[in-house]
Image (cartoon, coloured by chain):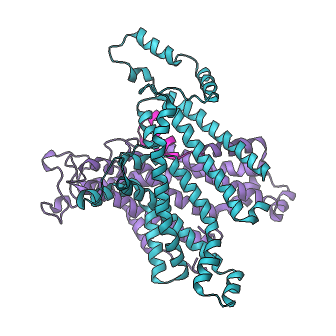
Chain colours: A cyan, B purple
Amino acid sequence: MGGYLARRLFSGALAILGIVIVVFVLVRMLGDPAALMMPPEATKEEIEIFRHAYGFDRPIHMQLVDFMKELARGDLGRSLRHDEPVMNMIMERLPATLKLSVTALVFSLILAVPLGVIAAIHRGTFWDRATMVIAMLGQSVPDFWLGLMLIYLAGVRLRLVPISGYGGFSHLILPALTLSVFPLARTTRIVRSAMLEVLGQDYIRTARSKGLSERIVTYKHALKNALIPVITVVGLDLGALLGGAVIVETIFAWPGMGRLVVQALDNRDFPLVQGGVLVMAISYVGVNILVDLLYSIVDPRIRCN
Amino acid sequence: MNGGKTRAPIGAIVILACIAAVAVFAPWLAPENPEEIVLTRRLAPPFWMEGGSIAHALGTDSLGRDILSRLIFGSRVSLIVGLVAVAAGAGVGIALGLVTGYYGGVLDNVIMRIGDVQLAFPFILLAIALMAVLGEGLGNVILVLSIRSWVPYARMVRGQVLALKEQEFVQAVRAIGAKDWRITVKHILPNVAAPVIVLASFSVARTIIAEASLSFLGLGVGVSAATWGAMISQGKDYLTDAWWISGFPGLAIMITVLSINLIGDWLRDSLDPSLKY
């Protein structure tokens, strides 16, 4: 177990390092930030001074080494545009992203588990087919379009909820709903197939033959075991959501990590892009490792392998 | 899933065939030039709404361009990008999977680590950055989206090869002196075809949505190009007055992707019962 964890942590760290280097090089291909940051009437000398101050005149591998050195001290640098420490800016945005992704995940789970169970125990009936059609639709709809249509219907036509911005729970509903649709659809399908598989197992027959009620068999014996594969998918979803729901955050003007990084890309704000990407990659990889650990706790069979 | 019995999704196949036909015959089917700007007729509603006319059956956008014609031409971009990007990604992925699985070693390690790096990160951000560097254009969109898709193919094919290469039939062919490439291409590749086809069908669906997302963000084929994603983006500032500008292209994406997903589901159930989800 310890060896496995160490291996996972090592390959995770390697992946994070890889993505940081790729992004570091990539943003420097976007163009010179001096052209955007300096006033148009700036002289050549002034632009040179700017570039020198931030080290952009140095060879790219030297810049990378400098960045790594600062990173080792926990310093992500300062934003070019906002002249604030990148770390502070990320810490300001992180709660919004957390709030949004966790709410979306909760929305999806609250619906997906009962829907999947109902579809499985009524397999082949109208309810099963209806649930599967809805799930298929949910996996096929582009989230940004769904978000816009929700804004139009719930916000503009019916005036039920605020259509954008950051605030209380009412601001959270539309973006979280939009984000929850894909995980909802996928989780419903997985709960259904996992339930179908578990319901065919010998121990379910045993439980039934002991005279237990169908309800206890379904919820206590079957569902508990059927939820094991669900953990993986939910973990992947959380990782992806934490990575910033870039487009949904843009549509709803949600001040999260995704939007922060996209704006930073637009502004060629290199340090901010690098810092944001680093934090996203860490949360993505971190959640995946956590899920693997959780998996082996829930299912002791995995621990042996 | 239904006890081994799977019915072909006739409806989805017919719809997809129609969409493909529309894409191929777009210039003959579209009532108007999709780029023609006529400001005097801007924001005309679809024909069943008050003020709409059958001349612009699905209405016009903020520049007076005919929505139906733009939808028809937009199908081309979605299908071309979906098919070509997946074909390219799958081709590279399969080749890398065969090589890494068969030979192992340092190359295997390096390529699989590169795959890890790519999967350690939400792809859309990488795509945004890449498109910002490369610039708009059909070729660049296809390039970026094919970079996205090689990893799952490589992983899956590699896994299959690892399992297959110790099988007796492969050892038998090797014993009679077959060369490596012949073993992989002739004897191993056909055995991974089924899962590859299933995976490819779902990736076409995902890629169409990814292309639309990039176009929506203004990082796609071109800001003014008639693509479904760009159309949704052009309509987003007119939601209150003209929902149809964004509404119809989104429906088009949903119907296309839904059809592909249904076909993918059917392929998976009939080709490869071991893949459950």
The image position of residue B5, as x and y in percent, is 57, 81
Magenta region = B120-141
The image position of residue B81, as x and y in percent, is 45, 50
Which residue occupies 52% across, 73% down?
A116
Which of these two is toward me, B133 or B183? B133
Residue A104 drawn in magenta? no
Which residue occupies 34% across, 18% down?
A39
Q: Is residue A37 left or right of residue B178?
A: left
Can residue A16 be spotted in the picture? yes
Q: Residue furthest top?
A: A45
Q: Determine the main secondary structure of the stretch shown in magenta.
A: helix
Can residue B156 be spotted in the picture? no
Residue B129 drawn in magenta? yes
The image position of residue B37, as x and y in percent, is 20, 45
Which of these two is toward me, B246 or A191? A191
- Above or below residue A204? Residue A159 is above
Which residue occupies 48% across, 53% down?
A101
Q: Residue furthest right?
A: B175
Q: Quadrant of the C terminus of chain A?
A: bottom right
Q: Is residue B274 left or right of residue B243?
A: right
Q: Is residue B98 left or right of residue B166?
A: left
Q: Quadrant of residue A279?
A: top right
